[in-house]
Image: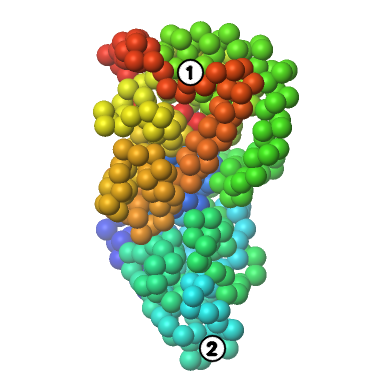
Amino acid sequence: MLTALVLAMLSTCSPKPGSLTRVIEGGVLRVATTNSPTTCYDGPAGPTGYECDLLRAFAESIGVKLQLVYVANGAQAVVRVASGQVDIGAAGLNVTPAYGAIVRFTRPVQTVRQQLVYRADRGKPADLDHLDGQLAVPAGSSMAERLAQMRIKHPDLIWLEVPDAGANDLISRVVDGELAYTVANSDLIAINQRTSTRLRVAFDLSGTENVAWALAPTTDAKARDSLFAAVQNWLQALPEKELARVRDRHFGKFENDEYQGVVRLVADAEERLPKYRQFFEDAAERYGLDWRALAAVGYQESKWNPDAVSFTGVRGIMMLTLDTAEHMDVTDREDPRQSIEGGARYLAQLLRKMPPGVSDPDRTWMALAAYNQGLGHLEDARVLAQKAGKNPNRWDDVRAALPLLAQERWYVDTRHGYARGGEAVHFVDNVRSYYDLLAWVTGGRSVAPSPAAQAAAVKSASDPQDGPAEGVR
């Protein structure tokens, strides 16, 4: 089915795949991907995700912009690559014989296992011969290929291949009880289990499998003009330490126990904070903020480390992106005074952009959530809260809605799509804890600025070019 579709598309296309020169001269690297937590999604600083962060870094290494083309599933990404519509397919693609017959795979960017999942209240099936309900997988997927192989040992095995559906969508249907079982990669399942306690793994359907990027087969005689060779060389040269950092960022477990963090803050408040306290106080006064709240954000972001830097390029005490730094008139993100000034100005803008019906302290907590995940995703959560009959101007209700942005059942109908909403909740909770401790250590408590300070902040933080609505972290 997949091969026939590719051949049909090839008959109408005249691609010149594989040329590094063409990509560089065009200034754009076209990539087919999926809207998924393991691949690419809209983050506070633009598209992010495990594969997306790697793709952006590669695009920057050859001096071009990354252009994402979203498709429903991996099979559609492979078709786009084989037909020459895109340069790379990066959609959580398992390296399989069926895919390998029409595209060329790079070195692995991840290793996974295919697993059968079910909802806890259905009961765990013993094996493929004891399924009680509908099993479905994305059409043309590596999961469908795996099931076809297993039918030799399980001749009565039946499944449905769903067109225009991704693995994340089918996982959501299992969680919602609309589907009994599906098969997905272990990394995607692990991320979904963060937000759904009902999702269970029944058993593995495969051993370790490689996930890689797909490129069209090329007959380029010049290896140095081969896009495939350039990707391979870049992946091979990528330090394992950096790759581990990206994996940990996207697949690492959330830290729920903050006791060690609090203990560390006490020590850092004595050793590090005195160096930067005046900067926090000056910036907070200028933009009508509580300096301890601003310092708590800086601690959550970097532990007050002016040299902090992430793989995605955010850096400094307030972990500003390059784009945000430019809009906030920050010329050196690693300069503590400039970083704190830029973070304060950006936070003041977010506070000003909160709907007028949101009062403090809810206004501050929502602005902090937007600092972490972007205004767009915050607004999506407010809409979800309102649809559920909750109060979109109340932080507790929005806090409950934010994690839903990681579930396809909910984010598919939102304006900004998938988001790690649970991280925004975690971010705000941590900042609040750090603020409480700083307030105790330094004396006094006033997370909400005075009306006079708020009025001054509106005037000070606003200008004809407000900067990006989403751009920190």
- From the viewer's perspective, tell me whether residue 156 is left or right of residue 264: left
Q: Residues within 10 Å of mark 1 (few under 14, many from 20)?
A: many
Determine the residue located farthest toward the bottom in the rendered image: 156
x, y percent for residue 412: 33, 54
Q: State whether residue 345 appears in this view.
A: no
x, y percent for residue 413: 29, 53
Q: Residue at x 60, y 12 (%)?
A: 277
Circle 1: element type: loop
**Dot placed on the residue nearer the N-terminal end, 1 or 2:** 2
Q: Which residue is mark 1?
A: 290
Q: Residue at x 54, y 88 (%)?
A: 129
Q: Is residue 459 above or below residue 357?
A: above
The one nearer the camera, 15 or 236, is 236
The quadrant where residue 431 appears: top right
Circle 2: element type: helix
Determine the residue located farthest toward the front in the rendered image: 444
Q: Residues within 10 Å of mark 2 (few under 14, many from 20)?
A: few
Q: Is residue 62 above or below residue 39?
A: above
User: Which three-letter amino acid code belongs to the residue tagged 1?
Assistant: Asp
The quadrant where residue 170 appears: bottom left
Q: Which residue is mark 2?
A: 129
Q: Which mark is residue 390?
A: none
The one nearer the camera, 274 or 341, is 274
User: Which three-letter amino acid code belongs to the residue tagged 2?
Assistant: Asp
- From the viewer's perspective, tell me whether residue 131 is left or right of residue 417: right
x, y percent for residue 264: 71, 30
In 3D space, how far apart are the residues under numbered discs 1 and 2 (Cα atoms)? 62 Å
Q: Are marks 1 and 2 in contact (CB under 8 Å)?
A: no
